[in-house]
Image (cartoon, rainbow, N blue to C red):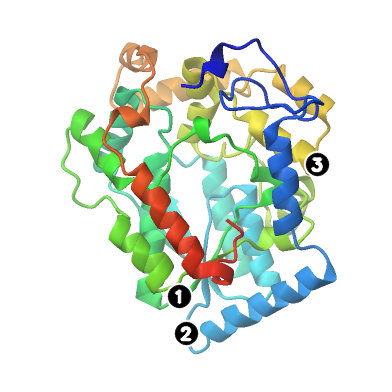
Amino acid sequence: MNDEVHAPYRICARCAMDTSDPDIAFDAEGVCNHCRYYAAHAKVHLHYDEAGQRQLAEIVARIKAAGRNRRYDCISGISGGVDSSYTAYLAKKLGLRPLIVHFDNGWNSETSVQNVHAVVSKLGFDMETYVVDWEEFKDIQLAYLKASVMDIEVPTDHAIAAVVNRLTRQYGIRYLLSGGNIVTEAILPKAWGYSNMDLRNIRAIHKRFGTVKLKTFPTFGLPERIWFQIVHGIQSVRILDYIPYDRRKAKEILAAELGWQDYGGKHYESVITRFFQGYILPQKFGIDKRRAHFSTMICSGQMTREEALRALEQPPYPNETLLRDDMEFVAKKFGLSLDELKAILAAPPRSHYDFPNNEVLYGKVKKIARAILGERNLHGN
């Protein structure tokens, strides 16, 4: 780990990022590298002007043309969260015909389930829900907890990519609508997570700490990824980057028109994600992801620094009662006693790199894919 972790505490003069990111760097004015990263990427990837609107119209026309005489012209994932729900809303406004895909990993909150149903039914879209085999998935997630690695969301994100890959083949779809966006998600330190594409790392962690043989867990290995991105040329479109996306206004529109309900913090529509981001990361790894979320909102003008700092003075969990209930629920769902779960969480942190991995190889493939795809890669990554 970077030696800067032992440097005196410091916080950015513009946003809320601080030295809890071991790789943070500050300029002479005290502004961090994340602010500079945001400014550079916003300049390139936000398309609000007339040229951007023409580009969006051209993209929509291409999607419709590619889907002519097919049941669907694109795929759009939905979690019940604001970004994915608003992406589906915009797809309707743009006249697209997406197949909505929901990945059920067994941790949906009641609000999430209600939101997914409300959005899909009100918009009149078809939806496919992939329900993962719980015994297998539980074993993978529990293996990650026992491994004491940072990013226990990797198995979910990896499986979602695998399911989407299968559906593009099944329906002959070439375009994905992504809820990813610059104005609320641009900032996220590399040191605060791990690649969800590293199947070797997933298998290594599960082999070491898992107990159940994986027979149905969806995987997305290197050959599949090459076919997906390079051979078949699947294109991901981040349509939220083509509108002045205001998260607060989006919530108001979704609530008023679709009956969508707010669920609290970012990604808190999932119980395990809420527990992971609100408890495990801060308590075990010293990471409060709200800093990254708030800092992005500061840079995009949707939040002031003062508002962010005041919010960060509050605990990451909405309240102690919910934390206690979630901890008991997580322990029970994993088949553990409360003491067993606490013992697992109390183990010293370990790095994903302590286990076999293919990060270097995946990095090379990613560069090759970018070089080949060029302008075909519409999500700006």
Q: Say whether marks 2 and 3 touch (CB < 8 Å).
A: no
Q: Which mark is residue 173?
A: 1
**In this figure, which residue is indicated by the disc labeled 2?**
70
Q: Say whether marks 3 and 1 touch (CB < 8 Å).
A: no
Q: Quadrant of residue 16?
A: top right
Query: Dot 1: few (<14), some (14–19), or many (≥20) neighbours within 10 Å?
Result: many
Q: Nearer the viewer, residue 101 or 20?
A: 20
Query: Dot 2: few (<14), some (14–19), or many (≥20) neighbours within 10 Å?
Result: some
**In this figure, which residue is indicated by the disc labeled 3?**
302
Q: Nearer the viewer, residue 25 or 256?
A: 25
| Dot 3 or dot 1, earlier in sequence | 1
Residue type at the position of mark 1 = Ile
Q: Residue at x 43, y 47 (%)?
A: 157
**Rendered location of residue 256, percent (x, y):** 76, 54
Q: Is residue 14 left or right of residue 72?
A: right
Q: Nearer the viewer, residue 1 or 187?
A: 1
Front tag of 2 and 1: 1
Report how far apart the C-alphas of labels 2 and 1 lie in the structure: 9 Å
Residue type at the position of mark 3 = Gln
**Rendered location of residue 50, percent (x, y):** 83, 71
Report how far apart the C-alphas of labels 2 and 3 lie in the structure: 39 Å
Q: Is residue 217 above or below residue 226?
A: above
Q: Is residue 257 left or right of residue 173?
A: right
